[in-house]
Amino acid sequence: RILSGFYGVLKPFDGVVPYRLEMQAKLSIENAKDLYEELTKLKIPVVVMEPLLGGRLARYNWALAHELSPLDPEATLASWALRFCGSFDNVLTVLSGMTFTEHIDENIATFSPLKKLNAAEFAALERAAQALLNLRTIPCNRCDYCMPCPYGLDIPGILTFRNEILSSKKKLSEKQILKRYYRAVPEPLRRADHCTGCGRCNPHCPQQIAIPDAIAEIDAWIDSLKAEVVS
């Protein structure tokens, strides 16, 4: 069994909602500011999981790079996220998923020794986080729990395509965006216009994305791009 500072006693296979708790998650406890502060007050060490939001913070994003790269041109976006987590005194450990040897090397270099963030760097991260929120990207981590779609859609491919366009520094024309869409989801029957809105994917999404709504919005956007190109 696991004793959680937020959920109480947990047994194997217990489901928890929300799936991801942010360190600044608000609590319905009197005089509690956020999750991290309350755990610190109770002297419960914090274990940070998914510090890169399932890999989203490791991918290039203009909004983040614009704020952070001038402070340290050599640092990756992933290392900024890891340093942020490690800069809180009550964080016991940071559990970061790694796929390649390079990821292991970078994580070791980031934490050995750890250079905690200073006030200017914390402020830059705050600005970067706000800029990222303003992009209105879809919080898809490509976990594929929503797959397979009963109607054959490439759900992660469609959502990730949208995020990559929003995160790009380069201003793309309608034709260029459509070309990228057809390259991201090459099979026509797997594209957004074949979504029936059945909603079978929704219960499987750990990020609680309203997937049919997001797909419908992308489909309408693609249709508007096609209309612009034709006109």
Image (cartoon, helix red, strand yellow):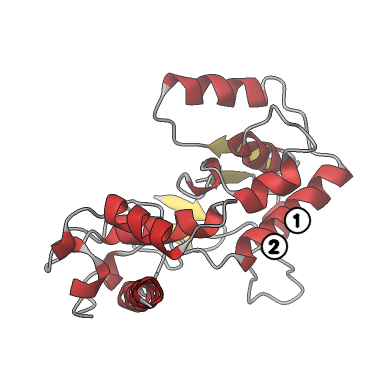
Which quadrant of the structure image shows residue 146?
A: bottom left
| Residue at the image position 57 percent from the left and 51 percent from the top | 170
Tell me what residue is drawn at x 65 percent, y 26 percent. Answer: 110
**Would you say 190 lies left or right of 111 here?**
left
Secondary structure beneath label 1: helix
Question: In the displayed image of the protein, which residue is found farthest to the right?
Answer: 119
Identify the residue under disc 2. 130
Q: Report if residue 74 is visible in the image.
A: yes
Image disc number at residue 172 = none
Local crowd at mark 2 within 10 Å, few (<14), some, or many (≥20)?
A: few
Q: Is residue 109 above or below residue 138?
A: above
The type of residue carrying mark 2 is Gln
Picture coordinates of residue 92, whole percent (x, y): 63, 38
Say whether residue 93 is left or right of residue 3. right
Q: Position of residue 113 (x, y in %)?
A: 72, 21
Q: Are dots 1 and 2 in contact, CB under 8 Å?
A: yes
* Element at label 2: helix
Give the residue at mark 1. 126
Mark 1 neighbour density, 10 Å: few (under 14) some (14–19) many (20 or more):
few
Residue 52 falls left or right of residue 187? right
Quadrant occupied by the C terminus: bottom left
Q: Nearer the viewer, residue 69 or 2?
A: 69
Residue 44 appearing in the image: no
Which residue is pictured at 53% across the width and 41% down the height? 58
* Residue 28 x %, y %: 63, 77
Residue 82 to residue 43: above or below:
above
Q: Is residue 130 above or below residue 231?
A: above
Give me the residue at 73% from left, 42% from top. 68
Q: Check disc 1 and give the amino acid type.
A: Glu
- Relative to 69, is 200 on the left or the right? left
Between residue 89 and residue 31, name the one nearer to us: 89
